[in-house]
Image: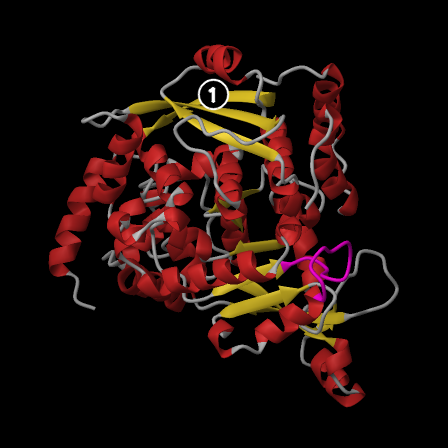
C-alpha cells in the first residue's frame, strides 16, 4: 500500500487499472483528466469520478473518508473551515440523498465487521435501531442526506463526523458502497430482510469467500475477482445461490499478492471451497470456449470486451466489499442461454419489477458444439456424416469446433419452467400461464397469447389466485 502526496495522485490507481486491461474510453478518461488538472476541491461526483475516489481510497493508506448524516455539502464545508482546516487536506465532498431502504443497506454493510455481541444486526429492526443511534432521532425518516468528505491528514488523525472507517476493511466497504453508483442503485432493489432471514447456505458460501478475499488477497488485486450468475438473484433476495461462480482474470500479470496463482490453485482443492466454480484465466481451470463466449457476452451488454465489464463501474457492483457482475449483464446471459430455468428466473425478475427488459420468445432449437481436438478422425467423420458441420470461425482458416442444430421439446421446456417457478420460488402457474408470459404461440389456437407484463396486472392476479387453489402438481 502507498500514500498519496499530491492532488494528481488521485487518478493514478484508476488509470493504472485501465492501462492493465487495455480499457479505452476516451470520454471517461477525458473527464478524469480534466477534473485532475483543475487541482480544486472536487464537488461534482459523476460515476467515473466516484470510481476514481473509490480506487484511491483502497490504494492509499493516508487517504481517509468520513460520513456525515443529514448534513449538507455546504454545512460540511463550513465545519471543515471552522474546525478541520489545520488538521486535514480535503480532496472531495460528495452529497447524496438515499431512501430509508438504501440507508439500511449502507448501515448494515459498513458496520457489519465492527459489530459486537451487544449490537448484532440480525434483523431490519436491529439495523433501524443503529440508524436511530447514528442520527440521534427517535423516528425513522423516508430519506436521508449523506455527505462524504474525502481527505488526508496533515499531522495526527482526528475523529469527527458520524462514521469514520477505523481499518482497511471498513474503508473498503465504505468506498465500494458510497462511491459506486451501481452499488447504491442495487440497494434500492435488494430485499434485505430476506437476506438476513433466509437462504442461510448461500450466505455462508458468500461470507466464506469474502473472508478468503480479505485475508489472503492483497486489496489492490481485488478488482481481478468478480462473482457472476445466481449470486445476483440471491443478493436481490429472490432465491438461493446453490454455488458461487467466480471469474478471475490472469493471476500471473501485474499482481501484488505473492504467489497469487498458487494460492488460487490451492484454494480450488480446499474442501470448504467445493461450492465455488472457479474460472481462472491462464490456468487449467480456464475453459477454451470462454475466450469466445466472454466476447459475445460483452457485446450483449453493450461493450466491446469482457475486461470492460470487469473494470468499468457501469457493469458491476459491490456487496460488502465483494465485486459482483451487474444484474443487467446477468439478465443478458440468461436470455442468451435460452434454458427453461433461466426463463423462470427472468419471469420472476419481471414479476418483481426489479429491472426493465423484454423477455424474448424462447428459441425451440439449440446449437450443440464439440471440439475437434477431442475427437478422433473416425469420430469426426461419423459426426459429419450424422449432420454435424464445421463451425464458422469468422474467416479463420483453422476449424476448432463442429456444430449441429437440435430441436427442443416445447412441452418439456414449458413444463420445466412451471416446475422451476414452483420449486424455486413457490410461484404456482400453469403451462398456459407460461405460454402467455413468454409469448409462446399455441398452435391449437388462432388467438395470440396476452402479454401479461403489458396488460393490467389485476386480471393476472385474479387468475393466479384461482390457479393456486386448483393446480395440483
- Please provide percent x and percent y for residue 422: 27, 62
Could you say which is closer to the camera, residue 275 or residue 213? Answer: 213
Q: Quadrant of the C terminus?
A: bottom left
Residue under the point 62% across and 75% down:
266
Residue under the point 50% across and 72% down:
273
- Please provide percent x and percent y for residue 170: 48, 44
**Which segment did they paint magenta?**
248-259
- Please provide percent x and percent y for residue 405: 61, 67
- Please provide percent x and percent y for residue 157: 54, 31
- Is residue 455 part of the magenta span, yes or no? no
Vertical position of residue 260 compared to residue 156: above or below: below
Could you say which is closer to the camera, residue 4 or residue 345? Answer: 4
Residue 255 visible to an observer of this rendering:
yes
Vertical position of residue 214 compared to residue 148: above or below: below
Tell me the residue that label 1 is attached to: 95
Vertical position of residue 225 compared to residue 413: above or below: above
- Number of disc labels: 1
Amino acid at each position: 500500500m502507498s500514500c498519496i502526496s499530491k492532488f494528481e495522485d488521485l487518478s493514478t490507481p484508476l488509470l493504472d487499472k485501465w492501462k492493465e486491461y487495455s480499457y479505452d474510453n476516451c470520454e471517461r478518461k477525458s473527464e478524469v483528466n480534466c477534473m485532475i488538472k483543475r487541482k480544486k476541491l472536487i464537488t461534482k461526483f459523476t460515476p467515473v469520478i466516484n470510481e476514481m475516489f473509490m480506487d484511491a481510497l483502497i490504494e492509499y493508506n493516508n487517504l481517509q473518508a468520513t460520513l456525515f448524516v443529514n448534513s449538507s455539502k455546504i454545512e460540511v464545508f463550513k465545519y471543515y473551515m471552522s474546525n478541520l482546516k489545520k488538521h486535514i487536506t480535503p480532496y472531495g465532498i460528495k452529497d447524496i440523498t438515499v431512501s430509508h431502504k438504501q440507508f439500511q443497506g449502507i448501515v448494515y454493510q459498513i458496520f457489519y465487521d465492527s459489530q459486537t455481541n451487544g449490537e448484532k444486526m440480525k434483523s431490519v429492526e436491529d439495523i433501524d435501531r443503529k440508524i436511530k443511534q447514528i442520527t440521534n432521532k427517535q423516528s425513522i425518516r423516508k430519506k436521508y442526506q449523506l455527505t462524504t468528505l474525502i481527505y488526508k491528514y496533515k499531522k495526527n488523525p482526528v475523529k469527527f463526523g458520524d462514521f469514520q472507517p477505523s481499518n482497511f476493511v471498513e474503508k473498503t466497504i465504505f468506498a465500494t458502497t458510497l462511491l459506486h453508483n451501481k452499488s447504491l442503485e442495487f440497494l434500492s432493489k435488494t430485499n434485505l430482510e430476506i437476506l438476513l432471514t433466509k437462504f442461510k447456505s448461500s450466505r455462508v458460501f458468500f461470507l466464506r469467500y469474502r473472508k478468503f478475499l480479505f485475508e489472503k488477497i492483497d486489496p489492490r488485486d481485488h478488482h481481478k475477482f468478480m462473482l457472476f450468475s445466481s449470486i445476483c438473484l440471491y443478493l436481490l433476495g429472490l432465491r438461493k445461490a446453490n454455488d458461487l461462480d467466480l471469474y478471475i482474470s490472469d493471476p500471473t500479470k501485474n499482481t501484488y499478492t505473492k504467489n497469487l496463482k498458487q494460492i488460487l490453485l490451492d484454494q480450488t482443492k480446499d474442501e470448504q471451497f467445493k461450492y465455488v466454480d472457479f474460472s481462472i484465466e491462464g490456468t487449467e481451470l480456464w475453459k477454451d470456449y470462454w475466450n469466445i463466449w466472454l466476447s459475445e457476452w460483452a457485446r450483449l451488454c453493450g461493450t466491446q470486451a469482457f475486461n470492460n465489464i470487469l473494470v468499468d463501474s457501469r457493469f458491476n457492483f459491490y456487496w460488502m466489499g465483494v465485486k459482483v457482475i451487474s444484474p443487467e449483464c446477468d439478465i443478458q446471459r440468461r436470455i442468451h442461454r435460452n434454458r427453461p430455468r433461466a426463463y423462470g428466473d427472468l419471469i420472476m425478475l419481471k414479476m418483481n419489477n426489479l429491472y426493465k427488459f423484454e423477455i424474448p420468445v424462447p428459441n425451440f432449437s439449440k446449437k450443440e458444439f464439440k471440439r475437434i481436438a477431442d475427437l478422433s478422425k473416425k469420430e469426426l467423420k461419423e459426426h459429419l456424416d450424422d449432420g454435424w458441420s464445421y463451425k464458422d470461425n469468422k474467416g479463420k482458416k483453422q476449424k476448432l469446433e463442429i456444430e449441429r442444430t437440435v430441436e427442443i421439446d416445447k412441452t418439456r421446456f414449458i413444463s420445466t419452467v412451471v416446475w422451476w417457478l414452483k420449486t424455486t420460488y413457490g410461484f404456482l402457474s400453469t403451462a398456459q400461464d407460461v405460454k402467455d408470459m413468454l409469448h409462446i404461440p399455441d398452435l391449437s389456437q388462432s388467438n395470440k397469447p396476452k402479454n401479461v407484463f403489458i396488460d393490467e396486472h389485476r386480471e393476472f392476479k385474479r387468475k393466479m389466485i384461482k390457479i393456486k387453489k386448483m393446480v395440483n402438481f
